[in-house]
């Protein structure tokens, strides 16, 4: 199975209570591709970069089975740049700089070689771009997953409503789910969102885990209890990439298998936050990933026969 | 096995976004006793009430196997009264009225008939009172569980530190764990708290579930995803009572069994919040409880063999 991952490949400069980086590589599609490539090949990247994006990073992605034909390289512009500072609680952050650079011109063209992909991960982007990618695909993928954010709810809601009708699964955080539906109860918000289009919904709650909704069913996965979240940048995109990568590898979009995919994504995300940027993802071994998934089981499983 | 539950029996007047009550019965030991009595008899209540506490409620507790010999009845004073208003998010509330009444004189005497109890639930009270109860017991219980709150951290920390050395398990919410240890990371906070005395620690996170810590092990139980939390009053005490009641019924304080006890307590608490006060707890059937525990399993269990 193949997965198309659409989103940014960028530079980030990050400050957390634990330290500070200069410009390091980042972007939603970068994290998603690293994560998905743990499980499946090929990952077909759809993104845009400037002349300054490091060749070494592109090589590392290709080695992992990430195809870059759909990554447009603009010769006379810089890559998208974001700089931010996380607060003590790591759940909120201030944006210090946003330089769109090449991103202002992003109008992705799906290469012929990507046609027929069974899985599509639409990273957080302007909804019009997400619609354009869906419409370029000659064959509807088995599963289309959408990430978005509050900014698009505020500035492009009609477009967002269109894209919601075209996707199978929406992935948002709890405050975004509340904002999109004007419902405080996440259960009510989930119902309303599924009436807007997506059959499946994942609500991410940061250090409080994630909920998957489908029909009348709910699954809850905790975040891994880490001593320190060193840098949360990219955790959501890593989760998304791991989730869709696992589904693609197993070619099974049943609710039961989505539970496993959420654990796979959560495990990868728990590594991502242990170091700055994608450092930890690049060095991660299959054995470490296996061990952590085992810990996830120990964390939540209980013997189910209670004496009442 | 028998359980001693120490705490308040009181009147509450509650406002939530869903409605408003006049004075209804409440108090930490009331909720804990209702919950514990689902699992074990006798529950031995240690509390204080005024002349105005309803006989009917006392009868209902006795029918459930709650012994009231340790409940002091003051003939010329009113019962403790608390009134509060919950905010939209149900995680924060304003206290409108606190009339201590009989609680100002609470100096519990453990009746002879309670001696030998194997389990002790110390509800949230002035630490000096909690110490006094522990010291009156001629035989150390198998498990002593302590609930406390930020107020005592601010006004009676030295006493609280003494009681922490005398208990086996502390139960606090996430902000209290952080306040007690000055650590934002709950994993670091948990380490520090266990250095202060208790071998076991439960950190409650409201709608985000609860964590159990013991040695190097962690267990996470989600809160049940309810469409609406109607009235959160008593949820924490119901959780505590259900937890210790289940341990007492099974007479097993292994980590594996504590996981089950947390699920039992969480299931009871999820009913408690569905209606005002103890209404839902009074009418709850064993079948409903069983069904909900089954839903807890469906909520968190995944097939553990992932294909990596």
Image (cartoon, coloured by chain):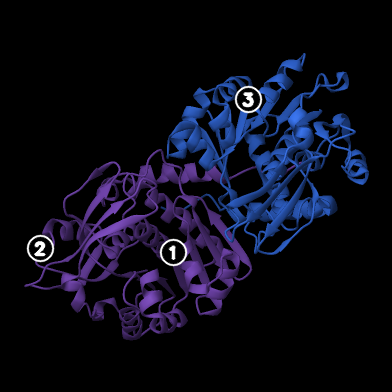
Chain colours: A blue, B purple
Q: CA distance from mark 1 to mark 2?
A: 33 Å
Of residue B195 and residue A58, the one placed in the foreground of this image is: A58
Chain bearing tag 1 is B
Of residue A123 and residue A17, the one placed in the foreground of this image is: A17
The residue at which mark 2 appears reads as: B52
- Tell which circle, 1 or 2, labels the residue nearer the N-terminal end: 2
Of residue B292 and residue A3, the one placed in the foreground of this image is: A3
Do marks 1 and 3 share a subunit? no
Q: Nearer the viewer, mark 1 or mark 3?
A: 3
> Which percent across, then down, holds residue B60?
19, 56
Q: State the residue at coordinates (73%, 39%).
A: A28
Q: Give residue A168's mark.
A: 3
Is A109 situated above or below B251? above
Is B240 situated above or below B301? below
Q: State the residue at coordinates (65%, 60%).
A: A226
Do marks 1 and 2 share a subunit? yes
Chain bearing tag 2 is B
Q: Are marks 1 and 3 in contact (CB under 8 Å)?
A: no
Q: Secondary structure at mark 1?
A: helix
Chain bearing tag 3 is A
Tell me the crowding category of disc 2: few under 14, some 14 to 19, or many 20 or more residues within 10 angstroms, Cα based. Answer: some
Q: State the residue at coordinates (66%, 41%).
A: A262
Q: Give residue B236's mark.
A: none
> Which percent across, then down, holds residue A51?
89, 38
Q: Give residue B247's mark.
A: 1
As drawn, the residue found furthest toward the left would be B76
> Which percent across, then down, holds residue A125?
68, 32
Q: CA distance from mark 1 to mark 3?
A: 44 Å
Q: Nearer the viewer, mark 3 or mark 2?
A: 3
């Amino acid at each position: 199975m193949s997965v198309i991952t659409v989103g940014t490949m960028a530079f980030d400069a990050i400050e957390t209570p634990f330290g500070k980086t200069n410009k390091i590589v980042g972007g939603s599609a970068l994290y998603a591709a690293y994560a998905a490539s743990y499980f499946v090949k090929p990952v077909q990247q759809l993104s845009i970069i400037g002349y300054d994006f490091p060749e070494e990073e592109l090589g590392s992605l290709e080695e992992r089975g990430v195809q870059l034909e759909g990554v447009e390289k603009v010769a006379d512009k810089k890559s998208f740049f974001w700089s931010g500072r996380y607060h003590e609680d790591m759940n909120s952050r201030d944006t210090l700089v946003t330089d769109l650079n090449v991103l202002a011109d992003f109008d992705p063209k799906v290469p012929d070689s990507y046609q027929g992909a069974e899985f599509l991960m639409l990273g957080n982007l302007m909804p019009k771009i997400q619609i354009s990618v869906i419409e370029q695909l000659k064959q509807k993928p088995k599963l289309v997953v959408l990430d978005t954010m509050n900014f698009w709810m505020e500035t492009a809601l009609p477009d967002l409503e269109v894209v919601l009708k075209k996707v199978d699964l929406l992935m948002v955080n709890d405050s975004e789910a509340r904002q999109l539906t004007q419902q405080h109860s996440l259960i009510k918000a989930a119902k309303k969102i599924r009436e807007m289009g997506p059959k499946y919904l994942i609500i991410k709650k940061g250090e409080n885990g994630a909920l998957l909704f489908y029909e009348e069913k709910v699954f809850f996965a905790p975040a891994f209890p880490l001593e320190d979240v060193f840098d949360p940048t990219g955790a959501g995109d890593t989760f998304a990439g791991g989730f869709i990568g696992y589904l693609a590898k197993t070619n099974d979009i049943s609710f039961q298998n989505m539970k496993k995919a959420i654990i796979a994504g959560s495990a990868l995300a728990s590594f991502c936050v242990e170091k700055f940027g994608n450092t930890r993802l690049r060095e991660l071994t299959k054995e470490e990933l296996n061990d952590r998934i085992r810990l996830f089981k120990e964390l939540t499983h209980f013997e189910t026969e209670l004496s009442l």
